[in-house]
Image (cartoon, rainbow, N blue to C red):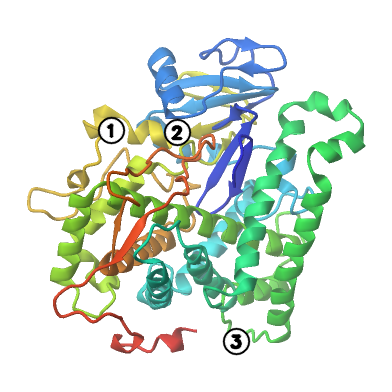
């Protein structure tokens, strides 16, 4: 995904950002004109709106000038930013702040129908969220069963990285495939080789759809565009290309759905897709019933788009920060060598004995703040908050970066210092406030447990086997994110990957060392 205009929409892992030709829609929204209701923020101008919040620097300037709650406007849309952790936690734990904005472009995949779990509101959303949480846990999310699945993908990823050692290389694309495979296993009991063209095409299709979808935001934020000829809007928003990509994506998913439907055993469900199909046969036909064909397709798409985009980019940040901080990386290497036996991948059973690695991963989550502005919320009904009246439809966002850069919480937030997550005895201490990489409240990240498992296992496996460094002597690593408003994805850049050789280790880790049969996990 590249270019100056960008929008990414994803679920579970939670991503949302818009950048319209440098006039960026970033966080949260008051839908409609609320003049006289909420006026704290930069000056507004007709048609264009006001100064947007494009990055952390803009956010910090406005927070200092207007306080922790302020409003901006892009086109016809007002944005309300919450930049204080306690206010974000208070608001997002209330059910009235759990709705989503009513934007047409969010429902393009479902033909304009509100569907899926990410951009759904009301009782149907709550029913579907509870269903997914229950069955994802049953299928192993956060448990050792899924740990086995991730370990196999980590093993395959380590082997693929070996083909890139010894010379400057960009991030291997097999990272995307390894993470997608974990989701495929949960959703449909499928697995692909990391170099398989089908999974590569699927990954590219998801990215392409997200990239093209950005233009559909224009009529939602600039409604006067709807008065232009339909043929012009169609070309402007690349509708033909979007429709074509949606058709391909739906075809790929429909093939898997039909395969499951033909082999469905209601008494022995294999995966999340089976559980959804069983629920569809038992569900009543009502407006609040989310168990139907449209919701099934959208939910699968939500899981894939959120599940791999955020995790794969977090893994890239880990590699970059290790390359930029060799002393920190050396301490991680030493800890892994002291705790994990040679030729054994660092499964979750070792995690409590790797506190420094855990602290490093949390510090990378903090400084990267991948989804800087969070996923947009909307007020479900008229309410008051922080002394302001917020009418129904007010779209509000908690600014993650504002919390992660708050000196009142972190002291020296601009410094990369993993020790802030360790106590005086060197044990890992989980932050009690100010830390929300997966959101907070009733719409916190649905797949947080999965994302944490993946980030730990993949990072530990790669750091056990490799050293990451700048591509050439004297070169540095670029830790500034790509210019995608309110999404802080790392820039694609060259790194040097070298194989680590430790005493007692062999050149290759094999699957036979595991105390369980990984093939049985599939």
Is residue 43 shown left or right of residue 56?
A: right
Question: What residue is drawn where x is 19% and y is 73%?
Answer: 340
Is residue 415 shown left or right of residue 222?
A: left
Q: Are marks 1 and 3 in contact (CB under 8 Å)?
A: no
Q: Nearer the viewer, residue 51 or 33?
A: 51
Residue 376 at what x, y percent from top left? 56, 38
Looking at the rendered structure, which numbered label has been put on residue 252? none
Question: What residue is drawn where x is 61% and y is 21%?
Answer: 73
Q: CA distance from mark 3 to mark 2?
A: 45 Å
Q: Are marks 3 and 2 in contact (CB under 8 Å)?
A: no
Which of the two discs, 3 and 2, labels the residue nearer the N terminus? 3
* Residue with the mark numbered 3: 267
Q: How many marks?
A: 3
- State the SS at label 1: loop
Q: Quadrant of residue 75?
A: top right
Q: CA distance from mark 1 to mark 3?
A: 54 Å
Above or below: residue 477 compared with residue 31: below
Q: CA distance from mark 2 to mark 1?
A: 17 Å
Q: Nearer the viewer, residue 439 or 476?
A: 476
Which of the two discs, 1 and 3, labels the residue nearer the N terminus? 3
* Residue with the mark numbered 1: 414
Is residue 337 shown left or right of residue 439?
A: left
Work out whether residue 429 can be spotted.
no
Above or below: residue 57 compared with residue 118: above
* Residue with the mark numbered 2: 399
Tag in front: 2 or 1: 1
- State the SS at label 2: loop
Extreme residue toward the left, this view? 425
Q: Quadrant of residue 132?
A: bottom right
Which of the two discs, 2 and 1, labels the residue nearer the N terminus? 2
Residue 288 at what x, y percent from top left? 70, 54
Q: Quadrant of residue 83?
A: top left
């Amino acid at each position: 995904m590249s270019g100056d205009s960008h929008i990414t929409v994803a679920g579970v892992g939670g991503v949302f950002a818009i950048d319209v030709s440098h006039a960026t829609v970033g966080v949260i929204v008051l839908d409609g004109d609320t003049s006289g209701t909420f006026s704290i923020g930069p000056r507004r101008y007709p048609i264009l709106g006001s100064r947007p919040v494009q990055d952390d620097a803009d956010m910090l300037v406005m927070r200092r000038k207007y306080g922790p709650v302020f409003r901006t406007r892009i086109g016809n849309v007002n944005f309300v930013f919450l930049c204080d952790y306690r206010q974000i936690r208070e608001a997002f734990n209330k059910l009235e702040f759990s709705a989503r904005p009513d934007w047409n472009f969010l429902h393009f995949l479902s033909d304009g129908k509100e569907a899926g779990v990410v951009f759904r509101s009301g009782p149907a959303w709550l029913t579907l969220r509870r269903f997914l949480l229950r069955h994802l846990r049953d299928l192993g999310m956060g448990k050792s069963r899924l740990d086995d699945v991730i370990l196999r993908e980590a093993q395959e990823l380590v082997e693929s990285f070996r083909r890139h050692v010894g010379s400057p290389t960009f991030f291997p694309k097999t990272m995307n495939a390894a993470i997608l495979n974990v989701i495929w296993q949960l959703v449909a009991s499928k697995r692909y080789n990391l170099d398989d063209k089908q999974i590569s095409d699927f990954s590219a299709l998801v990215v392409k759809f997200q990239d093209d979808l950005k233009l559909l935001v224009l009529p939602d934020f600039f409604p006067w565009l709807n008065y232009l000829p339909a043929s012009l809007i169609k070309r402007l928003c690349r509708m033909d290309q979007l429709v074509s990509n949606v058709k391909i994506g739906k075809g790929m998913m429909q093939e898997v759905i039909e395969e499951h439907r033909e082999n469905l055993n209601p008494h022995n469900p294999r995966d999340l897709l089976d559980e959804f199909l069983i629920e569809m046969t038992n569900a009543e036909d009502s407006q609040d019933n989310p168990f139907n064909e449209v919701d099934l397709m959208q939910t699968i798409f939500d899981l894939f788009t959120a599940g791999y985009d955020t995790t794969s980019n977090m893994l890239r940040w880990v590699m970059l920060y290790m390359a930029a901080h060799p002393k920190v990386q050396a301490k991680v290497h030493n800890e892994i060598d002291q705790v994990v036996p040679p030729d054994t991948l660092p499964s979750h059973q070792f995690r409590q004995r790797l506190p420094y690695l855990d602290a490093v991963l949390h510090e990378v989550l903090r400084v990267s703040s991948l989804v800087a502005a969070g996923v947009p919320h909307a007020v479900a009904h008229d309410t008051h908050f922080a002394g302001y009246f917020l009418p129904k439809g007010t779209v509000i966002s908690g600014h993650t970066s504002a919390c992660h850069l708050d000196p009142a919480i972190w002291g020296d937030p601009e410094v990369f210092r993993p020790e802030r997550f360790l106590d005086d005895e060197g044990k890992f201490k989980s932050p009690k406030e100010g830390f929300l990489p997966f959101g907070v409240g009733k719409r916190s990240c649905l797949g947080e447990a999965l994302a944490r498992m993946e980030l730990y296992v993949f990072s530990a496996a790669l750091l056990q086997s490799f050293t990451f460094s700048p591509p050439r002597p004297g070169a540095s690593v670029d830790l500034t994110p790509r210019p995608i408003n309110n999404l802080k994805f790392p820039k694609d850049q060259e790194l040097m990957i070298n194989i680590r050789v430790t005493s007692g280790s062999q050149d290759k880790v094999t699957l036979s060392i595991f105390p369980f049969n990984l093939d049985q996990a599939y």
